[in-house]
Amino acid sequence: MNRYSKITEKVKREIVLLKAYPCIWGKCSFCDYILDNSSDKEEIIKTNEEILRNITGEYKVLEVINSGSCFEIPKENLLLIKEIIKEKKIERLFLESHWCYKNRIKDMREFFEIPITFKIGVETFDYDFRNKVLNKNAKFIGIDELKKYFDSPCIMVGIEGQTKQMISRDIEILLNNFEHATINVFVNNSTKVKRDDELVKWFIEEYKELLDKNDKIDVLYNNTDFGVGD
């Protein structure tokens, strides 16, 4: 599995995929990424130290992801990331967290002492589909509540049960309310949730040209488009 890469379009940055402790929620119906997690602290720390050695700071922007939330990365690795940020003169950090950790976001911002773009897997702004179908357990009511804590929502398109209207509304919300966002096109995995190929085809025909030109929206047509993962 590749765990270090460079994103050379839109917001240029280095990205690392770290190992971490099990996801605090771990029950999303569509997600099998959590299989990358571990309970072996020594293994996690050692693996992550090797990955973090690749960081050069050339873009002054770093994204750190794991199969869960940044709060599940061992403190030893977080301290090392902080050292690297200072050594490489990195000026902006991307992190991701589940809604469950919303009350700890401020603490993480203060810990790193540089601007952080905090991402969250929203998947959709349709409350019922997000929580009853995808079992996301992200029970914010409106955009303002989400923006109190997070800067950059990640949504997913192309899942059976989604509608064109739902996706169009989600994209409109992203474009009109956030300075950065990510759209993931769903790819079949080991879960029971399935991809709707016709819906994906419609999305690409309807939105690809618009979104590919928009510097504040990252679109992952495949889940490895950032160059990390498997």
Image (cartoon, rainbow, N blue to C red):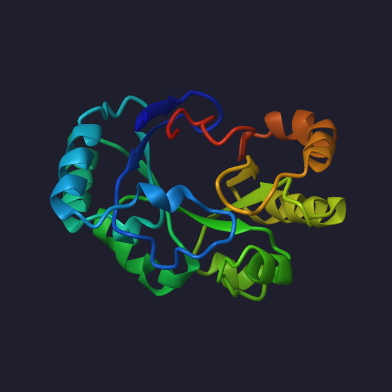
The residue sitting at 31% across, 67% down in the picture is 107
Q: The C terminus is located in which quarter?
A: top left
Please give left or right for residue 76 compared with residue 97 in the image: left
**Residue nearer the viewer, 217 or 48:** 48
Residue 51 percent location from the top left of the image? 25, 34
Please give left or right for residue 59 compared with residue 77 in the image: right
Determine if residue 116 is in view.
no
Residue 221 percent location from the top left of the image? 64, 33
Please give left or right for residue 81 compared with residue 31 in the image: left
Residue 186 percent location from the top left of the image? 65, 43
The residue sitting at 74% across, 55% down in the picture is 170
Q: The N terminus is located in which quarter?
A: top left
The residue sitting at 32% across, 50% down in the picture is 114
* Residue 33 vertical position relative to residue 12 in the rendered view, above or below: below
The residue sitting at 59% across, 75% down in the picture is 139
Residue 53 percent location from the top left of the image? 20, 30
Determine if residue 5 is in view.
yes
**Residue nearer the viewer, 169 or 44:** 44
**Residue nearer the viewer, 190 or 22:** 190
